[in-house]
Image (spheres, rainbow, N blue to C red):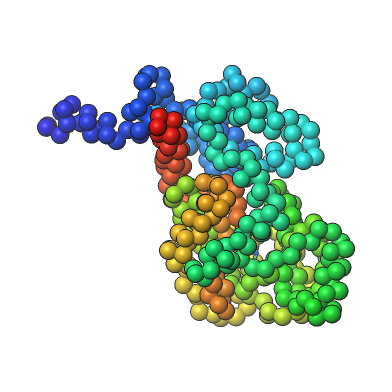
Amino acid sequence: MGGRAFSFQAPLLWNQLPVWIRETDTLSTFKVRVGFWFSDKKRRRMNLDAFVQFCADRGVEVVEIDLTQPLGPQGPFDIIIHKLSDVIVEAEHNSQSQQLLDNFQSYVSAHPDTILLDPLPAMTQLLDRFASCQKMSQLNSSLRDWHICTPPYLEVHSGSDAIKIQMLTHKHILFFSPQVCKTRVAHGSYSHEMCLLFSAASLADIHPPCVLQSFVNHGAVLYKVYVVGDKHCCVERPSIKNFPSGPCDRKTIFFNSHQVSKPESNSDLTSLDEQMVALPPPSSDAVAALVKELRAQLGLALFGVDVIVNISTHTLTVIDINIFPGYEGMPQFFSSLLSHIQSVLDQHASAGSS
Ligand SMILES: Nc1ncnc2c1ncn2[C@@H]1O[C@H](COP(=O)(O)OP(=O)(O)O)[C@@H](O)[C@H]1O
Ligand SMILES: [Mg+2]
């Protein structure tokens, strides 16, 4: 009985309230309003309707933003979560998408109190594989002590770059090892169309602009690391089998990345040709160090990293970074996202009151 009395429960509940609620002076500000914008596909994958309900049950209103309508009357928003990648990529060649993006950006600039999770420039850098490979390559020095690295890569801007690489290989100035060819644009269905090249002659098969990333044998196991603010989790997925390391006259293998690293992926490309002892998964300390470094370097809170373990050196190798990934397989994703939203609002309120 004593434990349920007001004198006991009220201070307890009060102490558990986020700082920004305790420090507010009007009752109306008690209701947090989160705006969101996702593509239909992302909405479904994330089960956004369930997230909206999850938040409503906890006193947080989550409302969908209609980019085609003026944003002012749709607000105010305490925070906006979004995955505008489609719009950002389309805006490059579509004036309607550019208009939607401009409207969105003007709203954000005119409302400095609305927090944008995550900032557009930080996201935009990951839509270009030249830029994201560059970011990943910084890990080679910053995380050397953790034996974390990223494979060497070449930017291929045009057909003439591909011919130069071919010539340098013939002259033995470049040594050709198997390469994964990835489109420069890292978003949209075409960006998942890739190929594996086994000789310099096969460079005739690529369509620049693209990235050639050295293929690393990893025993057909990939780890997807999902990050939500200061929480992360690591899930195992199938991946591409091992190949002999030098050049060979094997034909180019074209594949769609969705066919190799989904939970259900199972094909010739993902079944090992040889027996091998499974390597231990990456240590949780190394993954935590990687996440911490990337959060600081990218300025993002919601992202995913694909890592593999090199079967020869056991080095943790970062091959891909994704903005606001699917989070399939991350337990407690909803509560992690909501608690991140609340902690960002707390920090914002404390920064404003100090
Ligand atoms: N450098 C690499 N070495 C070995 N396998 C790779 C490498 N890069 C990509 N892969 C394989 O190809 C898949 C797709 O590559 P990724 O860069 O993650 O593309 P996407 O953006 O489509 O996720 C990975 O999940 C992994 O199985
Ligand atoms: Mg990937």
> Percent position (x, y) of residue 166?
84, 72
Q: Is residue 229 left or right of residue 70?
A: left
* Nearer the observer, 84 or 173: 173
> Percent position (x, y) of residue 103?
68, 27
Name the residue located 22 percent from the left edge and 31 percent from the top edge: 11
Q: Is residue 78 left or right of residue 249?
A: left
Residue 26 figure quarter:
top left
> Percent position (x, y) of residue 51?
48, 37
Q: Is residue 309 left or right of residue 333?
A: right
Name the residue located 57 percent from the left edge and 60 percent from the top edge: 306
Quadrant including the N terminus: top left
Quadrant including the C terminus: top left
Relative to 277, residue 93 above or below: above
> Percent position (x, y) of residue 15?
27, 34
* Nearer the observer, 311 or 154: 154
Name the residue located 65 percent from the left edge and 50 percent from the top edge: 126
Relative to 243, residue 134 above or below: above
* Nearer the observer, 191 or 11: 11
Q: As drawn, which residue projects farthest toward the front?
A: 354
Name the residue located 66 percent from the left edge and 59 percent from the top edge: 133
Residue 53 figure quarter:
top left
